[in-house]
Image (cartoon, helix red, strand yellow):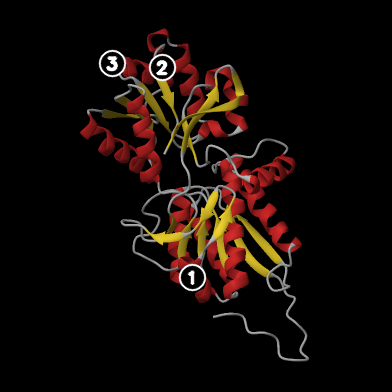
Amino acid sequence: MNTPPAPSGAHPDRSPVRLGALVPLTRPGWVEAGRHLLAGLEQAVEEVRDTGGIGGRPLELVVRDSAADPERAAAAVDELAALGVAAVVGEYHSVVARAVAARADALGVPFLCSSAVLDALVEEPTEWVARVAPAQSRGWRIYADFLLATGRSRIAVATQPSVYWATGTRVLRDHLAPRGGSVVALDAAALTPGALCDALVDHDVTALLLLVGSPEPAVPIVRAVRADRRLAGLLIGAPAGQPEFAGWNEALGADGAGVPFLRYLPERLGPLGARVREELAERLGEAPSFVALEGWDTVTVLASLLRTHGTDRAAIAEAWPHVAVEGTRGPIRFSRTPGIGLWQWTWAPVQVADRDPSAPGGFRVLHTG
């Protein structure tokens, strides 16, 4: 329901409207991604404040560090709910976002997920959860099509134990197998980088995909493969987006170029996206990643709902299908997608990009979907 107007003669409510925000800010979380996500969330909150707030009330972000820990994040949802937040936003890691979604659903708190892509973010369909990031199955199928288009069909994945990596491996295998491709999984936790190189030679693969954390063990694996003359023609890929961030280039330099990854951007940003990107670059002191834009879009969507449908939690959850917001990467609307039990932006734009070997500080777009 909408927030009722104040009675005549009563003082208008000027108390802050609070949003809880979950981001990985310490290890073992992906700190660089968390910093960009938080920058996007904060930039949008400031813009909402500067444009009248929510019915004259300031918008306030209550930030908690998820540290890539599902239990810690679920406990933070309880804390934020008790603090009276209207909704919860953010999170980068899929396994953490899944725990956040479950707890938000149980408590009746709206959760708008910014960056986690796991299809099965919720066990059962729910009205309380929505997402601006695309589903993993869509992005990783587009990545598999890119591999096939470049003549790579014998794929190895260096992987670590995780539902996210296991799901990604399954998506790749299911998409490639009917098209003549194959996927062999190599345990990055059990193999040294040198032993991994030996296995790549033994399996005669044409591409190695890094389904592992960064910088460890991704950086040592890349260095070992680049130094192994037997693997000179091997494509190294990182669908989860590790090369997007400046830390990748700082750690690997030229060795980290030419590693295709997924990013959720259009080929060219429109005026809104270009303006927000410039503001975020000033805030971060470096070029913002697509994750920062996801953060900005998240708050902008929720601010629109809060302004038009009020701050009641149930009213927010009921309003997901009525979202119609111009985001940094295109018009955002939510719908129900078969096999995905939450409200989904269908779809954020998807690119396969890499760092340009001739200038590793810049990027090339290799494929779009």
Circle on res. 194: 2
Q: Work out whether residue 69 can be spotted.
A: yes
Secondary element under disc 1, as helix, strand or loop, is: helix
Q: Quadrant of the N terminus?
A: bottom right
- Residue in front for this viewpoint, 98 or 266: 266
Cβ atoms under marks 3 and 1 closer than 8 Å: no
Badge nearest the viewer, 2 or 1: 1
Does residue 24 show up?
no
Give yes or no for contact between labels 2 and 3 (Cβ–Cβ under 8 Å). no
Going by the numbered disc 1, the residue's amino acid type is Ala
Circle 2 Cα neighbour tier, 10 Å, few/some/many (<14 / 14–19 / ≥20): some
| Residue that numbered label 1 is attached to | 317
Relative height, residue 66 to residue 179 (above, below): below
At numbered mark 2, what does the secondary structure look like: helix, strand or loop? Answer: helix
At 39% from the left and 34% from the top, the residue drawn is: 143
Q: CA distance from mark 3 to mark 1?
A: 52 Å
- Mark 2 and mark 1 in contact? Answer it, CB < 8 Å: no
Under circle 3, the secondary element is: helix
* Front: mark 2 or 3: 3
Number of numbered discs: 3
- The C terminus sits in image quarter: top left
Residue drawn at (41%, 61%) of the image: 335
Q: Quadrant of residue 9?
A: bottom right
- Mark 2 to mark 1 CA distance (whole Å): 51 Å
Residue 25: x and y in percent read 61, 47
Residue 202: numbered disc: 3
